[in-house]
Amino acid sequence: MSSSVTLRGITWNHSRGFSPMAATAQRFNELHPGIKIVWEKHSLKTFEDSPVERLALDYDLMVLDHPCIRKAVPSGTLLPLDEHLAPAFLADQAAQTVGRSHVSYQRGGHQWALAIDAAAPVAFWRGDLLARLERTAPSTWEELLALARGGQVEVPAAPINCLMNFYTLCLASGEALFLTPGVVASRAAGLAALAQLRELLVLCDPGCWTRNPIASLDLMAAAANQKIVYCPLAYGYSNYARTGYADHRLDFGEAPLVAGQPLRTTLGGAGLSVSALRGHRREVLAYTEFVASSAVQRTLYTQSGGQPGHRAGWLDAENNRLTNDYFIRTLPVLDRAYLRPQFTGYMHFQKRGALIVHAALRGTLPDAEALAQLDALYRNSRLDTPAAA
């Protein structure tokens, strides 16, 4: 490898996103003193929305949300990792995936990122406050609503989260989303999902409409919070299950059952990709493989605040001890998580569709009109055939 190389990476601004990358970069530099990796960070919203084509001009390494892959591939800005990494290594990544995390970064027969992080909406709660109420976490949607009527439930309801939860409740009715040409969900399922979600959200603090999962986690874990005890649906962050990360340690687990069935929430997480527009490929690929390896994912990556994409990290006894069994409790949620559709224009749909669902839930757009707008947006955004979810 080169004797003096500096690589640049971009990830999102949270301990889960930045700290494990900084830790792995430091350790990799200790093992390879000639290779320095400098990680920068941007906001969660920028992480979700940034055009990969622009990032690839400035960064060797990019931590991406998997729907970004769809649009980036035709631009030629990402390196197809399957053409550069050993087949045995990629076979292990596929065999040890958390849910469909590994396949979510595939497109056109190639692997465009490695799943170094896995997440899906799960439930979390304040065990100390529930104990004070002599209650346990709700196990059914009806129990959830009863708790929410007392003003004790939080749901992050920024637009993107409203859309993800809309998907979840449509799926709960047995819907297969985006499979009928020009239709996101049937009218019956869509109307029922909006009504069910709105019934819950109107019982929450009005500030929820602008909060993302991180803001909701921070709110509930704060010492000042003595009222809000439970959140049924928010992307999980194992950091808050660790002692000392926030004022109060949170417990995590399955969302309440709907009609006796577990909910199928929407797969999130993050992948590590490589720019095809910059040099030092040997060094970049060596670091990429290091971060995604079973040994590092299970140990250094997770212990540094990461939420691994490799299954070994979720099953590891020490990781579960550190997080009060966060990983083993929520793994079933990720294993059944819904994978967002694969058509190239999906990010265009997601950005605008989130605003439509948000408006409907807030009562500024009639539900029937919202569903019609979603279907029209889907037709206009669809540039190729979506894969089955």
Image (cartoon, rainbow, N blue to C red):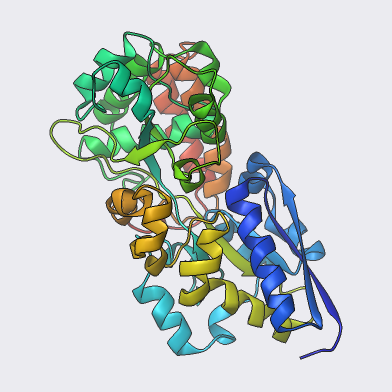
Q: Is residue 326 left or right of residue 358?
A: left
Q: Is residue 27 left or right of residue 169?
A: right
Q: Is 368 rendered above or below residue 217? A: above
Number of residue marks: 0
Q: Is 360 rendered above or below residue 281? A: above
Q: Quadrant of the N terminus?
A: bottom right
Q: Position of residue 76 (x, y in %)?
A: 68, 71
- Inspect this view and state whether residue 174 appears: yes
Q: What residue lies at 32% left-to-right and 28% top-to-bottom?
A: 190
Residues 40 and 58: in front is 40
Residues 241 and 196: in front is 241
Residue 262 falls in which quadrant of the image?
A: top left
Q: What residue lies at 43% left-to-right and 75% top-to-bottom?
A: 93
- State the residue lying farthest toward the left: 260
Q: What residue lies at 52% left-to-right and 40% top-to-bottom?
A: 350
Residues 255 and 227: in front is 227
Q: Is 267 rendered above or below residue 357? A: below
Q: Quadrant of the C terminus?
A: bottom left
Q: What residue lies at 31% left-to-right and 45% top-to-bottom?
A: 180
